[in-house]
Every structure is written in C-alpha cells, then in structure tokens.
Amino acid sequence: MTSRRSRVFASALLALGASLACDIGPERLPDMALYADGLDSARTVAPQPGVSFDPDNSTDGRGSLRIEASGERTVIRLADVALDAPKLPRLAYRAKLRGQDIRGSAYLEMWVNVRDKGEFFSRALYSQISGTSDWSTHEAPFFLEAGQEPTRAKLNIVIEGTGTVWVDGVTLTAGAP
C-alpha cells in the first residue's frame, strides 16, 4: 500500500512540475548567458594605452585588467560581441570594478546595434565608482522594444578624470526586465 501511495505521490509531483514548466513565459525565464570573460590573461582585450594585465589583483585569483587613466576622459573597449540572440526585452553587461585614487568617476557604457535602426547606448551612471573602492559588481542594462533585434553589443569602461580602475569578470546576459 505505501509503495502504491509513493508512486501516486511521485506521479502527482511530476505532473505538477510539467505543468509549471509549460507555464514559463519570457517574463519568467532566467537570464541567458551570451558572453563571459574572466579577464584572466593579457590577451583578453586588444592592446590599448594605459591598459595592462594585473595577475595579482582580481576577484577570482586569476588576474584582472588594470587601467591607468591620466586624462580628462578615458574610454577602454572591454568587449565586442556579435549577437544572434532571442528577442528578449533586455541585454545587460556586468563587470566587477575596483578603483584607486579616482579623481572623477568610472562607469560601464554599453553600445547596442539594433537591426535596421542603428547604434544606441546605455550608461550606468547610477552605478559609478570614485575615490578608492573595493571590488563591486556593476551593470549596464539595455532595454529593447518589441520587435527590435540586437546584432552587436559592445562594452566600454569610461573613466572621467584620473586614477586606476581594475576590471574583472565581464558577462553579457539576455533576459526579462
């Protein structure tokens, strides 16, 4: 008798799980990873003035990018990803940032090319670092309108002023808002 009850209970759980799985719409989908780069070597990013690999400073113990900003505005390209992504309403680049003696601020900037529309940007001005700060996660989201198809997503770190910024763990995800 207990064996039969166990089978009935297990069948009911399977049926419930199947019905819940069928009910997941785009608004309930988890983020999908489209790109990830731990920035664990010097060849991760194209050579640019003021950019070097720092093997001793990172969030994961495998190194990070170190950026020395000495001008009024420094823009460093961190990623450039061609997309063939599902039509989801949001893209988001995330990165871990750390700063030392930043006189001004540093933030993420994302550029998205939308098929037949052109290129648009999103700046994470609400999530800036300045002065000296420990590692923290920052995100630059980009919201798409219905029917818009992203074809490319670029990520920059912008430093308005001077100082040192370390960048680690860059990811690009797509998902619901």
Image (cartoon, grey):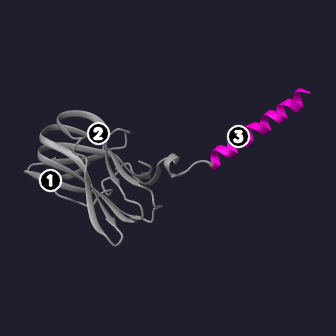
Whether residue 145 is visible, yes or no, is yes
Q: Position of residue 153 (x, y in %)?
A: 34, 60
Q: Position of residue 15 (x, y in %)?
A: 74, 42
Which corner quadrant of the image does residue 9 belong to? top right
The residue at which mark 3 appears reads as 16
The residue at which mark 2 appears reads as 57
Q: Is residue 17 left or right of residue 34?
A: right
Query: Which amino acid type corresponds to the residue marked 3 in the rendered image?
Result: Leu
Range covered by the magenta-colored residues: 1-22
Where is the N terminus found, in terms of image quarters? Answer: top right
Residue in view at x 20 percent, y 48 percent = 67
Q: CA distance from mark 1 to mark 2?
A: 21 Å
Which corner quadrant of the image does residue 120 belong to? bottom left
The residue at which mark 1 appears reads as 74
Q: Nearer the viewer, residue 36 or 144?
A: 144
Q: CA distance from mark 2 to mark 3?
A: 48 Å
